[in-house]
Amino acid sequence: MSAWFPPGPATLVGIGDDAAVLAVPDGRVVATTDFLIEGRHFRRDWASAADVGHKAAARSLADCAAMGAEPSALLVALAAPPDLPVSWARELAGGLAAECARASRAGAHVIGGDTARADQVVLAVTGLGDLAGRSPVLRSGAGPGDLVAVAGPLGHAAAGLALLEEGLASDPLVREHLRPAPPYDAGPEAAGLGATAMIDVSDGLLADLGHIAAASGLRVDLDSAALRPGDRLTAAARAVAASRRHPARTGLVTRPPDDLALGWVLTGGEDHSLAATFPAGTRLPPRWKVIGVTAGGSRDHGIVIDGQPWAQARGWDHFSAG
């Protein structure tokens, strides 16, 4: 597979040795890792190998961007069944390389990894990023009175998954589940604008903003009007609700379409959009949508919407009983 990944300009020693050597202009490296597991994060009957490659890269590259870094490189460990077609592996490599290419101005590159035999496809992807002299943007830096803003869509990937589960694969939102497109350059942009905290929305907006609230010791108060689902999500929710009311689908709990769409926005993960806090009065570019503010208080940490707590699950929990 090494021949399918071109070397990057910062790669001093590339694929083929015991380890790669990467030039680090800043002197610091942002590093993260993530899994993509067949049957848990993707299905080969729903997703092409290129889709899997794009998603596997996006999950780690978005984490680098959420620190304010420009993604620079990936290490990819692939475990697969022995009967996996070579054509599937080649297409996977193409998806990984293509997502790397759109991740930063200089492009990120796959610089190494490992392979192993397994009963199903498993990808473990390590992402590396360059801060370019900036301080990293942590989850713990938000202060009372900060603006809370988001760059990128919310709920689209969750809507796409729900559509797939109902056999409604023709809706364009399905692609946003199969190939999320994080706004990578919004991470360094936010750092340059003075962002005090940042995170990528992977487990759900409420769950991930909850990490910022906990780390920063404050409350995040969201404005429901700023989180109203758009027409695409509303139409998708109606289609999903109608499918679940079909006589053959008895036993499924069907939420009203408006509630379903709002749930996707608030708790649907895997869009890998960026959520950040900024000092009050910061003038934000149009792609950053203000959705709330932060407030202090010794016992008043967590997330509220229009001042009220969200009574349902906040997003994905990897180890929940469900």
Image: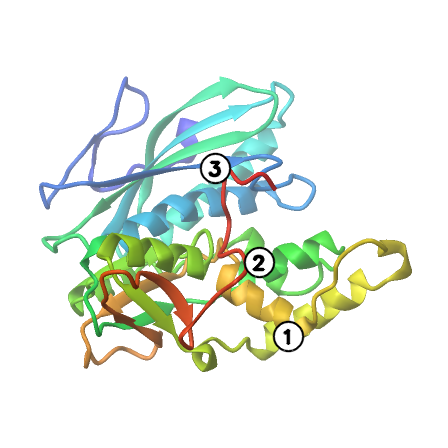
Viewer-nearest of discs 2 and 3: 2
Instruction: Give, as a three-letter code, the residue at label 3.
Output: Ala
Instruction: Give, as a three-letter code, the residue at label 2.
Output: Ala
Instruction: Give, as a three-letter code, the residue at label 1.
Output: Asp
Judge from the rendering whether residue 1 lies leftward or rightward of residue 211; answer left or right.
right
Picture colour scheme: rainbow
Binning the other alpha carbons within 10 Å of mark 2 as few (below 14), some (14 to 19) or many (20 upward) gives many
Question: Residue 261: horizontal and vertical position, in percent?
Answer: 60, 69
| Residue 280 visible | yes
Return the residue at label 2. Answer: 158
**Looking at the image, which is closer to me, 57 or 212?**
212
SS for callout 1: helix
Return the residue at label 1. Answer: 258
Binning the other alpha carbons within 10 Å of mark 1 as few (below 14), some (14 to 19) or many (20 upward) gives some
17 lies above or below 143? above
Q: Which image quarter is the C terminus in?
A: top right
Return the residue at label 3. Answer: 93
239 lies above or below 201? below
Labels 2 and 3: the sequence-earlier one: 3
- The residue at the point 25 percent across, 77 percent down is 284
Question: Residue 46: horizontal and vertical position, in percent?
Answer: 67, 46
- The residue at the point 42 percent across, 77 percent down is 306
| Residue 138 visible | no
Viewer-nearest of discs 1 and 3: 1
